[in-house]
Image (tube, helix red, strand yellow):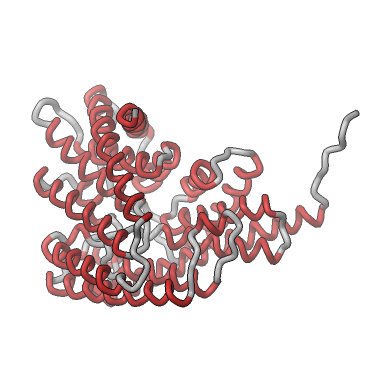
C-alpha cells in the first residue's frame, strides 16, 4: 500500500519564506555592524581605518602599535573574564545543534571579538559574524515556530551568511554552510543556503567593501606554474596538518577561569612587542597575505612573519582569546607558498603570485578540512581568473592528498 507523502501547508511555506528572508537581512545587518565596529576600533588604535591607508598599519609608529595591542589585551581579558563568569555564551556550532543562546551574552561576545581584531589582535574576524548569524537565526526560527530540522538548517545558513557577508563572498558562504556546517548538499539545504547568503550579502552592501580583498597579479596555469602548484600543495599539506592540530589543541585547552586575567594580557604583550617590529602580523591576516602577494619581501622575512604570526595566534587562543583561524591560515599559507616559490625560482621561471595564492588556498583547505569551501573562498577573496583556478585546484588536491598520506 502506498503511503501519501506529506507536504507543508501553504501557511508553513510562507512562514519558512519569511524566516529565510529575515535571517538573511539580520545576518547581513550583523556583518555590516561588525564591520563598522572594526573600522571604529582601527581608528582608535591607528588614527584611521584600513579603508583609508591600505591593509597594514606600517605607517603608524611602532610605539602606537605596541600601545594599541597592549590595550587590546587588557580589554579582551577583562571582557571575556566577565562573560565567562556571569553570562556564558555559545558557539555557532552549539546554536546550530539546538542549544538556546543568551542574546545579550552572544552579542557582547561577537562585538568583543571584532573589536580586538580592529585593535590589532592577529586572529580572524569571521567567527563573530557566524555566531551572530546563528544567534539571529535561532531567535527568528523560534518566532516563526519552525520544526527542529529546519531550525538546524537555517541556523547553519545564518551562520554561513554572516561569514559570506562580512567578506563579500556569498557563494563561498553557501558552500561553507553545505560542506562544513550541514555536511550535506541536499536540495532544500542548498536552496536555503544560497537564498539566505544572497540576501545577507545584499544587505551588507552599505558597509562591507565590494572590491576583492586581495590584489593578486594575474597568472596562467602554464606547465611550470602547475608543477609549482603541485609542489606547493604537497609541502603546505604536510605543514598545515600540524598547525591544524595545534589550533585544535589550543582551543580545546583554552583558559576560561581567573587565570585569563594574567595569561591573556601576557600573550598580548608578547604580540604587541612582535607587532612593533613586524607590523604585518597584526590584524586578521590580510596584511600578511597581501605582503606575500606583493612579492616584494625576502624568503627570510616571509619565514619570520610566518613563524611569529603562527605562534601568536596559537598563544592567544590558548590563553583565552576568541576569534577565527580562517584568514590567519590563509595568510600563513600565502607566506609559506611565497617562500617555496622563491626557492623554486632558483631552478625554473615560475610566478610568485601563483606560489603564494596556491599556498594560501591549500593551507586553508587543510585548516578547514574542506576543499570546496577553500577554493570558493580563495576565488572570492582574490577574484582569480579561470586559468589561475586550475593551478589553485591542483594545489588543493595535492595538499589534501599529502595530508591524508601523512595521517596514515
Residue 83 lies left or right of residue 215; in this view the side is: right
Asked if residue 278 is positioned above or below residue 301 in the image, the reply reads below
Tell me where residue 73 sits by quadrant.
bottom left
Residue 262 lies left or right of residue 170; in this view the side is: left
Asked if residue 36 is positioned above or below residue 302 in the image, the reply reads below
Q: Is residue 201 visible?
A: no
User: For this rendering, which residue is in front, 31 or 184?
Assistant: 184
Query: Which residue is outermost to the right?
Result: 1
Expressed as whole percent of the image width and height from the top left, the position of residue 64 reads 16, 74
Expressed as whole percent of the image width and height from the top left, the position of residue 382 reads 34, 46
The residue at 37%/75% (across/down) is 79
The residue at 56%/66% (across/down) is 101
User: For this rendering, which residue is in front, 372 or 169?
Assistant: 372
Residue 258 lies left or right of residue 189; in this view the side is: left
In what quadrant of the picture does the C terminus appear?
Answer: top left
Expressed as whole percent of the image width and height from the top left, the position of residue 88 reads 48, 70
Expressed as whole percent of the image width and height from the top left, the position of residue 298 reads 9, 45
Query: Which residue is outermost to the top?
Result: 223
Tell me where residue 374 sits by quadrant.
top left
User: For this rendering, which residue is in front, 368 or 13?
Assistant: 368
User: For this rendering, which residue is in front, 130 or 357?
Assistant: 130
Asked if residue 128 is positioned above or below residue 221 in the image, the reply reads below
Q: Is residue 208 visible?
A: yes
In what quadrant of the picture does the N terminus appear?
Answer: top right
Tell me where residue 264 sits by quadrant.
bottom left
The residue at 19%/40% (across/down) is 338
The residue at 38%/33% (across/down) is 386
Amino acid at each position: 500500500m502506498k503511503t501519501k507523502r506529506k507536504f507543508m501547508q501553504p501557511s508553513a511555506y510562507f512562514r519558512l519564506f519569511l524566516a529565510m528572508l529575515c535571517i538573511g537581512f539580520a545576518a547581513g545587518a550583523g556583518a555590516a555592524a561588525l564591520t563598522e565596529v572594526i573600522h571604529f576600533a582601527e581608528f582608535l588604535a591607528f588614527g584611521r581605518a584600513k579603508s583609508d591607508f591600505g591593509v597594514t598599519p606600517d605607517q603608524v609608529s611602532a610605539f602606537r602599535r605596541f600601545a594599541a595591542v597592549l590595550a587590546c589585551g587588557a580589554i579582551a581579558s577583562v571582557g571575556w573574564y566577565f562573560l565567562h563568569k556571569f553570562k556564558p555564551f555559545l558557539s555557532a556550532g552549539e546554536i546550530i545543534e539546538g542549544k538556546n543562546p543568551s542574546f545579550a551574552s552572544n552579542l557582547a561576545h561577537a562585538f568583543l571579538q571584532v573589536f580586538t581584531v580592529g585593535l590589532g589582535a592577529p586572529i580572524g574576524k569571521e567567527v563573530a559574524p557566524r555566531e551572530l548569524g546563528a544567534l539571529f537565526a535561532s531567535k527568528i526560527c523560534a518566532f516563526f515556530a519552525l520544526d527542529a530540522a529546519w531550525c538546524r538548517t537555517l541556523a547553519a545558513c545564518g551562520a554561513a551568511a554572516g561569514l559570506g557577508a562580512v567578506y563579500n563572498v556569498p557563494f563561498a558562504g553557501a558552500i561553507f554552510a553545505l560542506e562544513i556546517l550541514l555536511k550535506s548538499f541536499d536540495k532544500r539545504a542548498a536552496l536555503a543556503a544560497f537564498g539566505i547568503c544572497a540576501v545577507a550579502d545584499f544587505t551588507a552592501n552599505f558597509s562591507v567593501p565590494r572590491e576583492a580583498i586581495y590584489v593578486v597579479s594575474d597568472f596562467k596555469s602554464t606547465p611550470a606554474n602547475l608543477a609549482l602548484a603541485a609542489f606547493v600543495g604537497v609541502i603546505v599539506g604536510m605543514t598545515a596538518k600540524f598547525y591544524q592540530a595545534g589550533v585544535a589543541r589550543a582551543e580545546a585547552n583554552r583558559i576560561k577561569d581567573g587565570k585569563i586575567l594574567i595569561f591573556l594580557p601576557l600573550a598580548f604583550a608578547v604580540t604587541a612587542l612582535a607587532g612593533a617590529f613586524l607590523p604585518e602580523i597584526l590584524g586578521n591576516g590580510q596584511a600578511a597575505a597581501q605582503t606575500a602577494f606583493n612579492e616584494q619581501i625576502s624568503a627570510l622575512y616571509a619565514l619570520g612573519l610566518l613563524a611569529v604570526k603562527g605562534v601568536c595566534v596559537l598563544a592567544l587562543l590558548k590563553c583565552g582569546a576568541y576569534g577565527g583561524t580562517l584568514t590567519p591560515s590563509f595568510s600563513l599559507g600565502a607566506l609559506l607558498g611565497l617562500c617555496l616559490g622563491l626557492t623554486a625560482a632558483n631552478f625554473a621561471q615560475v610566478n610568485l603570485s601563483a606560489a603564494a595564492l596556491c599556498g594560501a588556498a591549500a593551507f586553508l583547505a587543510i585548516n578547514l578540512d574542506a576543499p570546496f569551501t577553500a577554493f570558493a573562498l580563495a576565488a572570492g577573496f582574490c577574484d582569480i581568473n579561470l586559468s589561475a583556478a586550475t593551478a589553485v585546484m591542483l594545489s588543493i588536491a595535492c595538499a589534501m592528498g599529502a595530508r591524508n598520506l601523512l595521517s596514515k
